[in-house]
Amino acid sequence: MMPHLIRGIFDGDGSIMAKPSPNNDGHNRFLHSISFCGTHQLMENISNYIFEHLNLKQKPTVYDYKDRQLSDIHIQNIEDIKKLGDWMYKNASLYLNRKKEIYNNFLNHYWQIDIDEAIQNDNKIKSVLFN
């Protein structure tokens, strides 16, 4: 149930970025991150849980906003973003499409994974095995 809970928090008060950005030398960099926003305690709990259970390379740091009751965490390591995204979206049927599409763009950029093709292949395998 935790992937569904954390995905719900992410859909409500999180963000994902995966886009090219021009560099000073004329080359494009690819900017990527997943972040969550909420109370300090909630961010601490999410950080601890995903670090321990997903075996992330870097534990997300909790940042407190000045003069506000909000905190946030950011995941920027490429492998950690993939672990978290795969975990949140595995067997998921309810999610914000726009955030899932950005995650799919991230996958496509780093792993050249065509999500639609992967789903079609998975469905073909299932039909052969179970029909």
Image (cartoon, helix red, strand yellow):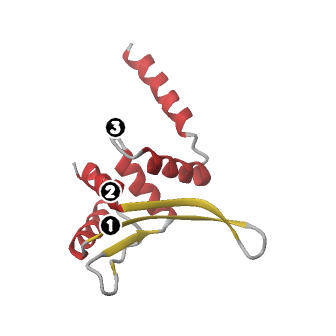
Residue furthest to the bottom: 67
Q: Specify the amino acid type for callout 2.
A: Gly
Q: Quadrant of residue 92?
A: top left
Foreground disc of the pair 1, 3: 3
Foreground disc of the pair 2, 1: 2
Tell me if residue 123 comes above or below residue 105 in the rendering.
above
Q: Is residue 126 above or below residue 17?
A: above
List x then y, in percent, for residue 27.
Answer: 75, 67
> Callout 3, which amino acid?
Ser
Give the residue number, with chain letter if any, for mark 1: 51
Q: Residue furthest right?
A: 26
Q: Amino acid at mark 1?
A: Phe
What quarter of the picture does the C terminus occupy? top left
Say whether disc 3 or disc 2 marks the residue closer to the N-terminus.
2
Residue 36 in the image: state x and y as whole percent: 35, 66
State the separation of the CA atoms marked 3 and 2.
Answer: 16 Å
Residue annotated with mark 3: 93
Q: Earlier in the sequence, mark 2 or mark 1?
A: 2
**Is mark 1 in CB contact (under 8 Å) with mark 3?**
no
Indicate whether 6 appears above or below 58. Answer: above
Toward the top, the furthest residue is: 131
Which residue matches tag 2?
12
* Mark 3: few/some/many CA within 10 Å (<14, 14-19, 20+): few
